[in-house]
Image: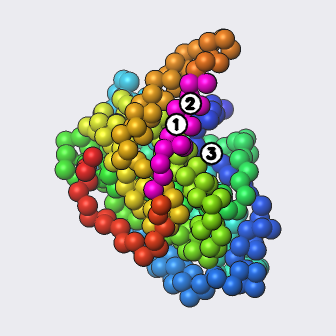
């Protein structure tokens, strides 16, 4: 490896994933012949919005970045770099998937293809901005190396849509919540990248809205018993993954003045409310048992990381499964009114 090129962090279940899918089936999803519910006017309207390119001039750096990075030292520096690397990897993973979809759908579904291409433009910008930030810490991620050497997780198109919908919306709520917190507490603003989050998160919100349109076009994705199970399953896995990830690096959130648990619960509640506007069922995140099990999972996850032998690990894995299953079996909330209007101006911390 060249000097200053950071070796990608080793992978585990909780590292940001790279996705691939069945592109032929994806073509069918956007074919008007096969799929008469496809609202082409809506897709064209969404495309127009992406073409406007509201954030074209947003991601411009200034001199304050390098100086701020130099001021972050010691342990804080290590966790800051890790935050940048994980965020960059996640953004870049979106870029790769959307770019490939844009390429593969070009002939059969040109409108959807252009939307994917423009979304990949946004994600490339986000990833590039984060990678530039890493250079303030004298590091860079070798994105070409990442592309070739990461393992790709295969999801059928339906599951790609649930998963990307949720990751866009949870991304939106994470960025906007950090942004609003730092607006209210400017002394905690360690590094200028957070000032860009307000417009940045609007990109993620728009990406998520495109997947809402995709889901509405396929009623069978959101209206039967199976769809309800999958909807809850994806909520569960996305919320748990974030909670465990963030709770294994609480120092980062504390370094910018956030309480990790409060921040996470806020993001989960808000994402869940947004998601309830389109998913047919969601988890009852306000059920106190939900948070109790999440906190138990954090403890078990921590012990698992320290366990060495299979004999030590087995009971922990069983306990992990027990808590996951307990959440899955909680009484769900029926949802899915697509007319639901989300209140983006709700107070930043209601939890
Ligand atoms: Fe992004
Ligand atoms: Fe996005």
Residue at the spot 77% in from the left edge and 61% down from the top edge: 22
The magenta region covers: 317-333
Q: x, y percentage for residue 108?
A: 76, 80
Give the side of residue 221 with respect to residue 27, left or right: left
Number of the front mark, 1 or 3: 1
Colouring mode (rainbow / by chain / secondary structure / one colour)? rainbow
Q: How crowded is mark 2: few (under 14 residues within 10 Å), some or many (20 or more)?
A: some
Above or below for 293 versus 225: above
69 relative position to 226: left or right? left
Q: Which of marks 1 and 3 is nearer the N terminus?
A: 3
**Where residue 99 appears, x then y in whole percent?**
66, 64
The residue that disc 3 covers is 17
| Prevailing SS of the magenta stretch | helix
Identify the image quadrant of residue 316.
Answer: top right
Is the Cβ of the residue at disc 3 closer than 8 Å to that at disc 2? Answer: no
Task: Describe residue 26's horizontal placement relative to residue 312 as left or right.
Answer: right
Mark 3 or 2: in front is 2
- Mark 2 lies on residue: 322
User: Which quadrant of the rendered structure holds the N terminus?
Assistant: top right
Report the residue that reaches farthest toward the bottom: 41
In the displayed image of the protein, which residue is found farthest to the right? 24
Badge 1 marks a residue whose secondary structure is: helix
**In the structure shown, which secondary structural element does the residue marked by tag 2 occupy?**
helix
Which residue was labeled with disc 1? 326
For mark 3, give the secondary structure.
loop
Which residue occupies 56% across, 68% down? 211
Q: Which residue is more in the foreground, 249 or 227?
A: 227
Whether residue 252 is visible = yes
């Amino acid at each position: 490896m060249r000097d200053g090129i950071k070796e990608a962090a080793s992978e585990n279940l909780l590292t940001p994933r790279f996705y691939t899918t069945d592109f032929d089936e994806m073509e069918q999803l956007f074919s008007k012949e096969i799929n008469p519910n496809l609202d082409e006017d809506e897709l064209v309207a969404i495309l127009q919005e992406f073409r406007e390119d509201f954030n074209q001039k947003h991601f411009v750096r200034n001199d304050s970045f390098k100086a701020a990075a130099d001021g972050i030292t010691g342990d804080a520096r290590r966790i800051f770099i890790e935050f940048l690397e994980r965020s960059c990897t996640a953004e870049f993973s979106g870029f790769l998937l959307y770019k490939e979809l844009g390429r593969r759908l070009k002939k059969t579904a040109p409108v959807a293809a252009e939307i994917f291409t423009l979304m990949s433009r946004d994600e490339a910008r986000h990833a590039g901005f984060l990678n530039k930030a890493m250079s303030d810490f004298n590091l860079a991620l070798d994105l070409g190396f990442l592309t070739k050497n990461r393992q790709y997780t295969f999801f059928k198109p339906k599951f790609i849509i649930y998963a990307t919908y949720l990751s866009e919306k949870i991304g939106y709520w994470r960025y906007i919540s950090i942004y609003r917190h730092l607006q209210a507490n400017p002394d905690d603003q360690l590094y200028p990248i957070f000032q860009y989050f307000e417009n940045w998160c609007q990109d993620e919100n728009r990406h998520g809205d495109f997947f809402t349109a995709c889901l509405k076009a396929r009623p069978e994705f959101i209206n039967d018993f199976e769809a309800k199970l999958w909807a809850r399953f994806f909520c569960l896995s996305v919320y748990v993954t974030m909670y465990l990830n963030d709770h294994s690096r609480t120092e980062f959130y504390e370094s910018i003045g956030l309480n990790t648990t409060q921040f996470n619960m806020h993001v989960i509640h808000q994402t869940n409310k947004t998601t309830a506007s389109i998913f047919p069922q969601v988890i009852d995140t306000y059920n106190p048992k939900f948070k109790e099990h999440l906190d138990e999972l954090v403890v078990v996850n921590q012990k698992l990381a320290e366990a060495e032998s299979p004999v030590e690990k087995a009971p922990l894995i069983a306990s992990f499964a027990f808590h996951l299953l307990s959440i899955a079996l909680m009484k769900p909330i029926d949802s899915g009114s697509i007319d639901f209007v989300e209140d983006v101006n709700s107070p930043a911390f209601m939890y």
